[in-house]
Image (spheres, rainbow, N blue to C red):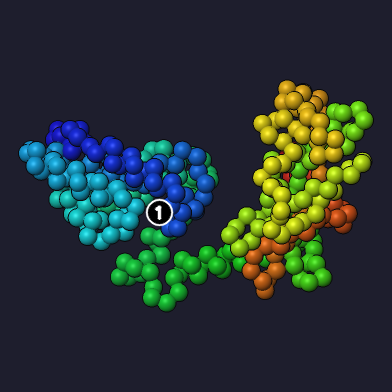
Amino acid sequence: MEKKFIEETFPIKKVSEESAREKNIKQGHISTLHIWWARRPLASSRATIYASLIPALKTEEEKKEKMKFIEELSKWENSTNPRIIEKARRDIYEAYGRPPRVLDPFAGGGSIPLEAQRLGCESHALEYNPVAVLILKAMLEYPQKYRGKAGKFADTESPLLKDLKKWGDWVLEETKKEIGKFYPKEKDGSIPAAYIWARTLPCQNPSCGVEIPLMRQFWLAKKKNKKIALKPIPKKDRIDFEIVKDPDSDPSRGTVYRAVVTCPVCKSKIPAKETRKLFQEGKNGERLIVVVTTHPKRKGKRYRLANEQDLNVFKEAEKYLNEKIRRITSEMEG
């Protein structure tokens, strides 16, 4: 059997550096499609597929040139470079006389089949995890099915994007029908988008005993032009909060660090070992603190302190969910 290039040499160091650099790239990267554990870097996938498919070279000069090319091929900015990609495809095609079949039997997040497809191969992927299967379909199968006659997306609106919007809107409307009541509109038209909760523990100082919200930090938004944080207001029998812009204190320091809890009222500490013991004994609680809202006509998120009405809505949602679980379970058993 003919030896492949990767069996003799490979630029491991350079490809590894590109793979590490790739972790900081978000725009256009498949990792933004869906979080997947143990996702293989695109850089190393692309480089190793290419090196595994082309034949070994005879002279040292040829090997050096090919090593340089693989280093270029592994770079993120060259993943859509026509000159680099077309050369890689041509090299692979010449080695086989046709697009070779590449199978990844444990495809996961799809890095290997995606890069095989990019290099002009007939790509196949297997997975038994339904989430991974959906990722693979969205990344590999659907874009191919929606290609135009010329092999490109339509110049106007992409049929893929059109269908995504259509069915995304349908899911949204059906969801609103069922659980929209648990996201009541506020007076200004804002809608709750998220709820920030905190686990709690009672202060172990007998003369204090307040409920301590366990929060590692108090930032709500930390951007260059938007700094919003919670400010704890310790009182004799409880801990209240304020929402402040451009805080003058350090919101990075919360009430818990490495399981050591500090009471904002009396400043006493609960050691890590005791913290874990209190949780094991069921002494912990929970507290709804902040409601995050969005507005259909405004950009960005807004934050407000939770109130009694928010807690009542949560209790109604909890009741509805438990009833639905009970009904579905009953139907499955019956």
Name the residue located 28 percent from the left edge and 44 percent from the top edge.
47
Q: Quadrant of the N terminus?
A: top left
Question: Amino acid under label 1?
Answer: Leu
Q: Which quadrant of the figure has residue 209?
A: top right
Q: Is residue 61 left or right of residue 159?
A: left
**Residue closer to the observer: 14 or 37:** 14
Q: Secondary structure at mark 1?
A: helix
Does residue 7 sit above or below 321 in this rendering? above
Say whether residue 56 is visible.
yes
User: Is the C terminus in the top left, top right, bottom left or bottom right quadrant?
Assistant: top right
* Image position of 247 with respect to 127: above or below: below
Horizontal side of residue 147 vs 66, given as left or right:
right
* In the displayed structure image, the side of residue 224 where residue 114 appears, left or right: left
| Residue that badge 1 annotates | 140
x%, y% of residue 317? 80, 52
Residue 122 seen by the camera: no
Q: Nearer the viewer, residue 269 or 88?
A: 269
